[in-house]
Image (tube, rainbow, N blue to C red):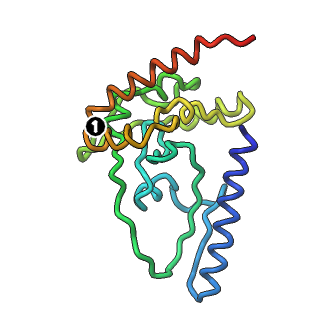
Amino acid sequence: QSVAVVKGYVDAAVIGMILSYSIRALGYQARNHMDGNYLMVLPLAAKNCGLGDIGRNGLLVTKEYGSRIRLGAVTTDLPLSTDSISDLCMDEFCLRCGLCATYCPAKAISSSTTKSNDKIHWVINDIKCYSKWQEFGTDCGLCIAICPFSLPLSASDVESYIENPQNSSRIIDEYKKNIRKRNQTKTP
């Protein structure tokens, strides 16, 4: 799993370098924001670009892949058209779900909420999270794996939730039943 994570970041960095070199060849400025050299918070930038919304785990959640993504970014002065903000709003879903907070081995994901400007916020204790990574010797990723959006959910379930956030209860209940079945599976 760790090799796949690193490969995802390397692939994003290589694509970003190729893209930034190509943009500069057109006469525009371009900067590749890659692992360890970011000048922006990538999940927030990705949300503002319409790719998804921020979940309780502090990561970008997309309709298609949940939080199972690796982000890279290139900033430029090249004139570009913009996308609209995603219609995926994770507030209601994460408020009802909370599995990432429950299963976080570091207890780094807040189970309580704060609200400002009609937007729900959760606090991630990055020190506790990183300390657990150090203890494990690699990144944890349990908050990504446990999220129902990382199944992936069926497109009809995602659309059902977007149309009516109250549908999150049914989706979460169904997912929790599947977790119990998975936990009860015996290995030889």
Q: Position of residue 56 (x, y in %)?
A: 43, 36
Residue 159 position (above or below residue 75): above
Neighbourhood count class around disc 1 (C-alpha, 10 Å): few under 14, some 14–19, many 20 upward: some
Q: Position of residue 15 (x, y in %)?
A: 66, 66
Q: Nearer the viewer, residue 84 or 122?
A: 84
Question: Disc 1 marks which amino acid?
Answer: Pro
Total labels: the figure holds 1
Q: Quadrant of the N terminus?
A: top right
Q: Quadrant of the C terminus?
A: top right
| Left or right of 33 in this view: 119 | left
Task: Tell me what residue is drawn at x 61 percent, y 35 percent.
Answer: 141
Q: Position of residue 53 (x, y in %)?
A: 40, 48
Q: Nearer the viewer, residue 77 or 39?
A: 77
Quarter of image, res 13: bottom right
The residue carrying mark 1 is 165
Q: Nearer the viewer, residue 4 or 182?
A: 182
Task: Tell me what residue is drawn at x 31 percent, y 43 percent.
Answer: 162
Residue 61 position (above or below residue 14): above
| Left or right of 3 in this view: 31 | left
Q: Position of residue 132 (x, y in %)?
A: 64, 29
Task: Tell me what residue is drawn at x 47 percent, y 32 percent.
Answer: 148
| Left or right of 115 in this view: 8 | right
Name the secondary structure under disc 1.
Answer: helix
